[in-house]
Amino acid sequence: MIRKAAQIDEQTPWQELTVGGEIYEGGTARLVNTGDWRTITPQFHPDKCKQCMLCFPFCPDSAIPVEHGRRQDFDLMHCKGCGICAKVCRFGAITFGKEGD
Amino acid sequence: MGIRDRLSGNEAIAHAMRQIDPDVMGAFPITPSTEIPQYFAQFVADGKVNTEYVTVESEHSSMSVCIGAQAAGGRAVTATSSCGLALMYELLYVAASSRLPITLACVNRALTGPININNDHSDSMGARSSGWIQIYAENNQEAYDNFLQAMPIGEHSEVRLPVMICQDGFITSHAVENIELLEDAAVKDFVGEYHPEHYLLKQENPLAVGPYDICAYYMEHKKQQAEAMKRAKSVILEVAARFRDISGRSYGLFEEYRMKDAETALVLIGSTAGTAKAAINQLRTEGKKVGLIKIRVFRPFPMEELAAALSHVKVAAVMDKCEDFSACGGPLFAETRSALYDLECRPKLVNYVYGLGGRDVSTEHIRSIFDRLFTIAETGETGEIYTHMGQRG
């Protein structure tokens, strides 16, 4: 049986994994929560954002989604908490701190 | 009809490759396997094969070429020896864990150091845990026959593992002996075409090969590999039966030579079997009940079968053409002694590490081992179990 990446998780027994870990589709990184080791978290303040689009290309991951030409709130499933976006924002629309602060 | 010829072991492998006509060869020379890509290059130049002949800068790259080609959907072959195999080491594991049935002709040579170009098994024995099926030959005929069987074994859907076809450097690879080749059409029919279910060049089926495994998945993939290696044993026998039907030559996991009523026996690998058989024939004329087990398949190891074959023997000597530096015996000895553990009544077992770096072994050496086995059978005293043979002093 051929399993798609979305059908495999950390509970899947060895008999049901693909042979040699082969992956039979593209873009499967979207399924993986790689933001879970983040220790510091960016916060988006839409009232201060000018939609200058500087933060989006500086994000080394894909944690700043853009829809219809407008920057959306963070995709924290993929944000590693590097803080580059907060450094490049000139309008104070991104702050950076411990979650819950 | 078979074709009678006179070929060295290296020529025999090159002819097997010509008849198979693989898609890609990763080619890099190293003594004593150099002649394989050399002869094969002539076949390429003469248009006798359609193989993409990729000359590379190292064995690390020749195995990488094979991995890329096999993942792309092709059949890939290479040949190497000694330090060349060592330089492939990292990629051997990648090929096996990616479940790519590459075929490697290993011409066994001592692994440096001290630097030495002659035969022993230290190169392939070092790679015995890499996840490759390992099949060893006694002579050029077996090297040829084993190579033809490699792809039907490795590519089998229940197996999907790379296969190493080993022969003794110089002794087998360079000595010219009579050989019976199969006709080209018979080989093509036997080996068949390679049609993997998933491959990189299959446009409608995007594929990623060899992705990173976090710890939540690595163990499961290793379990898959281990199970495939277990299943390989019956596939090896099925392929051997099919090969017997077209060639008349029979192969098993090991060969039992005059073992039926044997009370003392040798267990060994490779060309030394020829010498041992000659000594056994001499001893048999003297009324001694002696026999030989020549291991053909070392990975997967024929544990239960070997135990059964040795169960009626009083004393056996396991001969390792490889020093394991375990301080308690060679790798074949360790496997054989482990195999015998489950027997109710075990034969006594001693180990000889011999023939390192091309050190010669004669019928007199074999007779001297049997003389010791006869004494052990009489007295029940094994004495020192882990010994070396053939060195001065």
Image (spheres, helix red, strand yellow):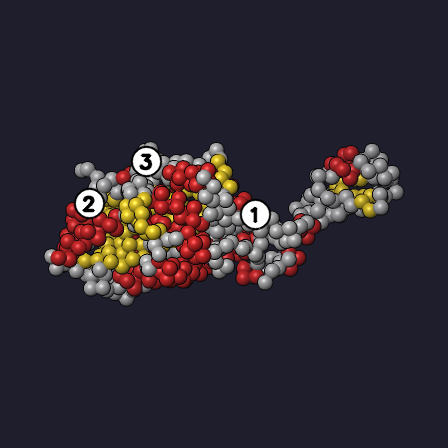
**Which residue occupies 60% across, 60% down?**
A2
**Which residue occupies 45% across, 54% down?**
B188
Q: Which of marks 3 and 2 is nearer the N terminus?
A: 3
Q: Is residue B186 above or below residue A72?
A: below
Q: Do the residues labelled 1 and 3 touch (CB within 8 Å)?
A: no
Residue projecting furthest to the left: B286
Identity, as a three-letter code, of the amino acid under mark 2: Ser
Q: Which of marks 1 and 3 is nearer the N terminus?
A: 1
Q: Can residue B210 be seen in this view?
A: no
* Mark toward the viewer: 1 or 2: 1
Classify 10 Å Cα crowding around label 2: few (below 14), some (14-19), many (20 and above). some
Q: Please tell me whether mark 2 sits on a helix, a strand or a loop.
A: loop
In the picture of the structure, the residue carrying the numbered disc 3 is B117
Q: Please tell me whether mark 1 sits on a helix, a strand or a loop.
A: helix
- Chain to which the residue tagged by mark 2 belongs: B
Identity, as a three-letter code, of the amino acid under mark 3: Ile
Q: Quadrant of residue B302?
A: bottom left
In the picture of the structure, the residue carrying the numbered disc 2 is B362
